[in-house]
Image (cartoon, grey):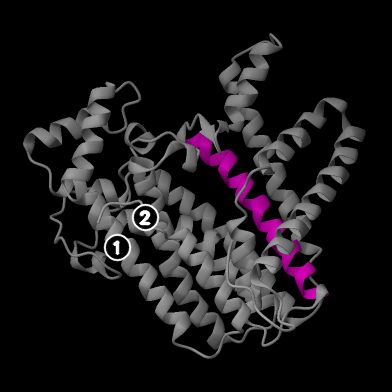
Amino acid sequence: MTAPARSGSTPDLHALDQRLVQEVQAVHRALIRDRRGELGRIAPEALTLVDSLERYLAGGKMLRPRFCFFGGLAALPEPPTDEQVAGLALSGAAIELVQAAALMHDDVIDHSPTRRGRPALHVEQSAAHRHRSLAGSSDEFGVAVAIVLGDLTLSWAEQLFSQALDSSEAAGRARAEFDALRTEVMCGQYLDILHQAGGLGNGRRTTGTGQAGVDAVADREESGPEAAALEVIRWKTVPYTVLRPVRMGAALMGADDQLLGLLSRWSIEVGTAFQLRDDLLSVVGDEDQTGKPTGGDIVEGKRTVLLARTVAHADEDELALLERTIGNPAAHPDDVRAVHALMVDSGAVASVAQDVRQRAGAARALLEGTDALGELGRAGLLTLAAQATDTDSLPR
């Protein structure tokens, strides 16, 4: 994270960011050390769970702890104290554990082979099963371990977050945000599963208007596939990526309802733009940058806004191509490439990219148009949003 250095006694934004990362990593190291001792006393075989979590936490972008941190700074008129930095780092470390647990389970649900450029946890454990010549199905073993470690990580997140709290009203409000984060992301995951099965919205083909922007969904059928995809984003991605982390940090630092409302509106715009961009990167992104196979959403059959717009503008032959390719792991590579080209040539990629830009612009205007924010928090959130919604590499 980069930002201009500040003169005088005001902390440099980049230095604050690096301090946060270091403190979150220190919290995770302490947790791994303590849990290794705890699980070692239960059974030495269980130590592999801690080892797997340690590897899993390495290499993460720490986006959510950063949103929590700078959301907290947005509620402070002055630079944070050491105690405030520590409290926000501990909260961010707990959010990162929730993220890890969610990804372990998500990769199982989506049958994703990789995560962050490495084998997904269930794939890694399946390979370990084969390497040790254990009995039974290697694939089922890998899935089972991913479920168990995901559950365990989620419970450790709760224990860790509790350490950040005292008996103050601010701590109670932050606790409510953390509770909402976990409930909303799990409900959002269910909506995603339901949507993949065609049970969210009516699943009918809708006619796109070609108008992108913050309120684009209002111009389409409320029960159409694009609206359903946006609903999944609203409850699966937005709450635990941006909205609740930002509100948690701000609440912990004593933000009032008016400030929390402003940050909520900003978070919904940024979180939605972030997921729309992520869906685009699955199709037109660089595998080395994303850590995910390009075109993965095509063969997985992810019902994204991008797919909804591609379907809306497809002719009969193109619909046949989509029908035999989307959600087909055995699809011919030529068909996958043809779907990729169709998404680009139809204008669907460009229109979704424009949505990202417009939502990012609306979010930026919210922060720049108020004097209710601490300047360090405002600068940090603006920088994070710019990174999370960057579209320079996407078609216009």
Front-most of 116 and 209? 116
Q: Label 1 amino acid?
A: Asp
Q: Quote the CA–CA distance across marks 1 and 2.
A: 8 Å
275 sits left or right of 114 in the view = left
Identify the residue position indicated by label 1 in the image: 355
The residue carrying pointer 1 sits among few (fewer than 14), some (14 to 19) or many (20 or more) residues within 10 Å by Cα, namely many
Highlighted range, magenta: 83-109
Q: Residue furthest left?
A: 316
For the residues labelled 1 and 2, say whether their Cβ atoms are less than 8 Å apart: yes
* N-terminal-most mark, 1 or 2: 2
Residue 141 makes an appearance in the image: no
Front-most of 21 and 188? 21
160 sits left or right of 386 in the view = right
Which residue appears at 36% of the width and 56% of the height? 392
Identify the residue position indicated by label 2 in the image: 276
**Relative to residue 360, is residue 201 depicted above or below?**
above
Which residue appears at 14% of the width and 36% of the height? 319
